[in-house]
Amino acid sequence: IFLDFFFFSPFPLLKVHLSFLLFLHRLAEEARTNAFANKSKIIKPEHTIAAAKVILKKSRG
């Protein structure tokens, strides 16, 4: 119900901002998972790039 207000609100900039924040959150989670899978304690750029590819593939449908 709370997210319905933002997605169907007359504030398109707010909707874009929320969508971007959700994307960043998913990216951080996926990059952390990749780093953990590679037994790395630090999230490196290659973890983030691989995570971005996975997330963008999922978003295409």
Image: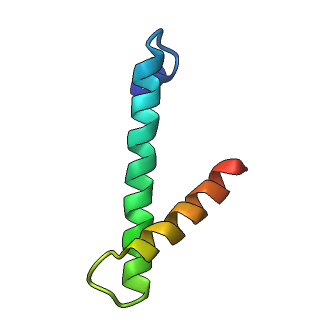
Question: Is 31 located above or below residue 26 in the figure?
Answer: below
**Residue ranking furthest to the bottom:** 39
Quarter-wise, where is residue 42 in the image? bottom left
Residue 39 shows up from this direction: yes
Residue 19: x, y in percent?
46, 36
Question: Is 60 located above or below residue 11 in the figure?
Answer: below
**Residue ranking furthest to the top:** 10
Q: Which residue is drawn at 48% across and 17% down?
A: 12
Q: In this view, does 52 lie to the left or right of 11?
A: right
Q: Residue at x 50, y 23 (%)?
A: 7
**Residue ranking furthest to the left:** 41
Residue 24: x, y in percent?
40, 50
Residue 13: x, y in percent?
43, 20
**Residue ranking furthest to the right:** 61
Name the quadrant of the N terminus. Answer: top left
Q: Which residue is drawn at 59% across and 64% down?
A: 54
Residue 1 shows up from this direction: no
Question: Is 38 located above or below residue 12 in the figure?
Answer: below
Between 30 and 47, the one lying in front of the other is 47
Q: Residue at x 53, y 71 (%)?
A: 50
Quarter-wise, where is residue 29 in the image? bottom left
